[in-house]
Image (cartoon, rainbow, N blue to C red):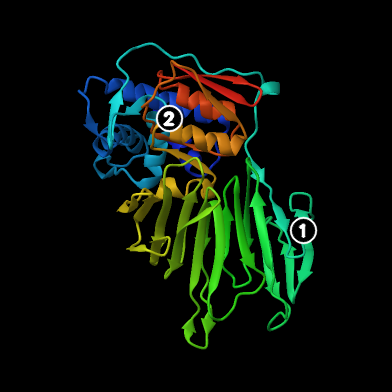
Amino acid sequence: MNKQTISGFIRDYLHNKLNEKQKAQLETWYLLKAEENKSIDPPIAYEKLEAKIWNKIIAGVSHTEGESPKVAKLTRPYKRIISIGIAASVLLIAGAGYLMLKNNNTTPDRFVVAKKYDLPAGTDKAILTLSDGKVIDLNNNAVGKIATEAGIEITKSADGTLVYKALKAKGKNVGFNTITTPIGGQYAVILPDGSKVWLNAGSSLKYPTAFALSGRNVTLTGEGYFEVAHMEGPKGRVPFSVTVVKNQTPSEKVEVLGTHFNINAYADEPFINTTLLKGSVKVALNNDQATLLKPGQLAKLSNEGIKVQQADTEMAVAWKNGEFVFREDLRTAMRKVARWYDVEIVYEETAPENLMLGGWMSRGTNISEVLNHIQLTGKVHFKLEGRRVIVSR
């Protein structure tokens, strides 16, 4: 590609205007740029390597457009392109925060699967269970009114969100509803108090049809992203809390003092991860040990207690934004893939144990595209058999 074509591709990519073939061309170009830098001895600091490669690239592009190369900066949108073209395709993270360039000139075989055997991405789908036991398939329901319970009208909006709206000041008989997403599904719900919750695949949320003025509590399994609305009561702000259930046992309680946070509590994950983006939350282990989080912090809960560390907020909420962000080991990444594409992951004896990945991809692509990018590391091979992904070296 010439510099003018590259410049146009970058602009179009940032505005989501590229087709799959054009994206592949842009990724290939980045791969070549990264190979030019392979003489640098690893390990190299992640940010410095990205900046070094990008500044060489953007300097040429800026010069083509009549701009001074000296003003080129590695901004956040451009770093995403770097992640696609370099981190996902030619770089491996060698320990926390480091990348290693491929040290050979061989091109790994791409994962190839006939279209009729490929698997599509997950979709917005869920089951709603009302307080009387009635089950509603939200995927099959048209936009509009779904049900009415104790003075609450439940509707499905045009964008597929489940919305609760009070018809009266207060319902007489408050019941509990549960929304459940299957593996390969996701859904969003606006609760009776106006709070919005996004549920990832294989998750559920139980909540009352009307919240009491003494307190608001919901129960989560799996993974959910919360944006909590303010609710005023006679004694001030009505508190909001989340009871987190893992392996059928209440394991954590999150008391919300702010608004935006993500909780990952899948049964097959080693920790319950609570990531705070805005406001503050108090994370309690079985109402015993408690920790207050600040924005940008992550609480990792296990049987040993609660450990607080700096969060990778982009990776934590990538699923909610329709993305995969892989800055983790292969097996953690493949658990995400399994939930979203409804597949079983089978590891052969030769499968790598501690392969670290770095990169970004859309969750809207078929599974073959995701496996293609991971396989381009040259360290792992995939084979798709029905709904089984066989992993080997």
**Residue 214 showing in the rendered view:** yes
Q: Is residue 225 left or right of residue 379?
A: right
Q: Nearer the viewer, mark 2 or mark 1?
A: 2
State the residue at coordinates (66%, 43%): 123
Q: Which residue is mark 1?
A: 143
State the residue at coordinates (30%, 23%): 101
- Circle count: 2
Kindly indicate the quadrant of the structure image that contains residue 270.
top left
- Disc 1, SS: loop
Q: Which mark is residue 330?
A: 2
Q: Which mark is residue 354?
A: none
Residue 375 rendering spot, x and y as whole percentages:
46, 22
Label 2 or label 1, whichever comes before in sequence order? 1
Q: Quadrant of the C terminus?
A: top left
Return the residue nearer the eye: 371 or 12: 371
Residue 273 rendering spot, x and y as whole percentages:
42, 51
Residue 370 rendering spot, x and y as whole percentages:
53, 30
